[in-house]
Amino acid sequence: MSGINPGNVLTEAEGAEPAVPPPVSGGKAKPSWRSLNFGARFWIAIGIIAAISALAFFGSALYPYSPDEKVGGLYDSPSAEHILGTDNFGHDVLAVLMAATRNSLLLGLQAGILATLIGVLIGILAGYTGGWLEELLMGFTNIVLAIPAIIILILISISLQSTNIEFLKGFTGLALVIGITAWPWTARAVRAQASSVATREHIDVAKLSGARTPSILLTDVLPYLASYVVMAFVLQVASAILAESTLSLLGLGPSGTQSLGIQLHWALAFQAVASGSWWAFLPPTIVLTLISFGFLFLQSSLDEVFNPRLRRGKKKNLAKAAARRAEAAKKLAEQATTTEVPA
Amino acid sequence: MSEAATPTIAADTTQPVLSARNVTKQFKVAGGHITAVNDVSVDFHAGKVLAVVGESGSGKSTLARMLLRLMPVTSGTITYLGKDVTTISGRELRDYWRDVQAVFQDPFASFNQFFTVGHMLKRSLRLAELSEGGEAELIEKCLGYVGLKPDDAVYKYPHQLSGGQRQRVMIARALMMNPKVLLADEATSMLDASLRVSVLNVLQSLRAELGLTVLFITHDIGQACYLADEVVVMEHGLVVEHGTTDEVIFSPKHDYTKRLLADVPDLKGSLKSRSWQPDAPAAVTTRAIDRKDA
């Protein structure tokens, strides 16, 4: 191929490239994630989740009592020694709360990761490929969706208690069960987005460049779904923690361990509410509420981060812009007055 | 204008490079189907520019997508250098894409916005027949064809380029495979007037220098006239007129072609008086037609 005289090619008129920023040192462009505008809601949500995580993962290392250690009698009131008193077994409530929060968060993460992986895999394949595979995968998704998840969870939890496989008896087994019953909503949301992305021109360009389907799914489709996947994952974690708490509250959770639901179960079983022992049931309820609120708030704030239409802008920037406009209007008014003065 | 449309290009008129025979595309809709392309037969000869013109929904882009094998045909055959490529897949299809490349309408949507231009160009190297270590050279050469330097584009994200630069990068990407046929699907419709001329000139030069066969799809009959040797006019999925640029533009036979020509904006600012009723006849003949008749 012979070269074309560059003189034949018209270059853009000067000033036609306002979108081009000045070259960055080293020729490398600024990564796109740095332009994300995290609002106050995002940082509040992160703050709540970070505080609870610190309580769960670092608190127990600093706290003198173990969650399995009998340190008092039945429902001893809060004191200087035991800040939140003791539970029905005579264990320190704060020590149990910290261990329970850690277990609940870890279970939520495991179940959330599993549900998101299954949902994304099924959704992206169905949405991108279309045709009979989409019909098949979405038909299966709708069947799973039609069966109430709580019934499956209760039935499998009961059967897990009687299994001989130790691995399935604990939290991992429960996380597995919650994960494989919670993916359909993610699959449906991802499929809708994937089928929209699949019609975009950059997918055609990738095909014409010789890219194969797995590469297109990973490089050209998945990044466009990243915001939905992150938001779905956050919701999955929150709902998995709530699902575990529900099962454990009913007495169907794993035995011989701690979780927020198990703590509530024992508090109810040993008449904590009737006896006015608020320290036995209120702390796990508050932590559970804060976890749910934190994750849901994070999801909603991420929606604002990823969706520019919902972005409100920083207040100080809005104030600066208003001040600039007022200044410009003032100058214009002054100019008008000076030009109107008769000679 | 007719001078610009007839460059001195040696063309092989014996066997078409790419050919569509009785190609039809139907889409299923609730309660039946829509025929987007209806029994279309077109030949593309080496080194020629063939423009397909028609209004939105006339089936131009569907035809292009079928020719690119990005969409299956309902019936009919597509042949490339005499070989039936209507149902090829896998390695055969990638080999076909090495020879038949495209530039699309939206210079922003054609890019994966998460990666740099360099990443996108390197990805295309997969299909390029390349000697060891020649990647950077090939990228530089192909960007050079469209008047760009590697530093202007390679490290930048798509949003950091202007519309014209993005479209030129897309042309460079297509050229990396050293294709025989280039399909430009409304490649200039989202660019402003000066950038449009720039891209049209790039296509013109590439055809002249590299002997590319170009399928230029446009709703703008003026651009077709500027660039094409042959023009195909499509309406509601049917080819209503087909001939050399001079025949179709300056001696239109079909009413639809006359209407399209009547709708070309007049530079002197006189708006056409034709009513917007779908069946209304063209009340004003174009200046071009008048001149030809005179």
Image (tube, coloured by chain):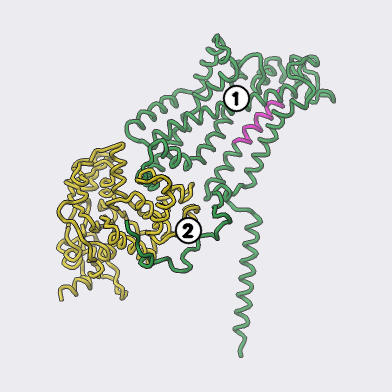
Chain colours: A green, B yellow
Pointer 1 residue? A107
- In the rendered image, residue B120, in percent from the top left (x then y), is placed at 43, 48
| Quadrant the C terminus of chain A occupies | bottom right
Question: From where the camera sits, is residue B284 visible?
Answer: no
The residue carrying pointer 2 sits among few (fewer than 14), some (14 to 19) or many (20 or more) residues within 10 Å by Cα, namely some
Whether marks 2 and 1 lie on the same chain: no
Q: Position of residue A208 (x, y in %)?
A: 34, 45
Q: Position of B283 compared to A249: left or right?
A: left
Q: What residue range appears in magenta?
A: A281-295
Q: Which residue is mark 2?
A: B152
- Tell me the quarter of the picture where residue B260 sits: bottom left
Location of residue B181 with respect to A281 vertically, above or below: below
Give coordinates of residue B284: x percent, y percent.
Answer: 21, 71
Residue sitting nearer the eye, B246 or B211 = B211
Vertical placement of A137 versus A39: above or below? above
Q: Residue at x 59, y 22 (%)?
A: A246
Q: Residue furthest front?
A: B132
Q: Is residue A288 magenta?
A: yes
Circle count: 2
Please indicate, yes or no, whether residue A320 appears anywhere in the rendered image.
Answer: yes
Q: Is residue B107 magenta?
A: no
Return the chain for callout 2: B
Q: Nearer the viewer, mark 2 or mark 1?
A: 2
Label 2 to label 1: alpha-carbon separation: 49 Å
Residue B209's tag is none
Q: Amino acid at mark 1?
A: Leu
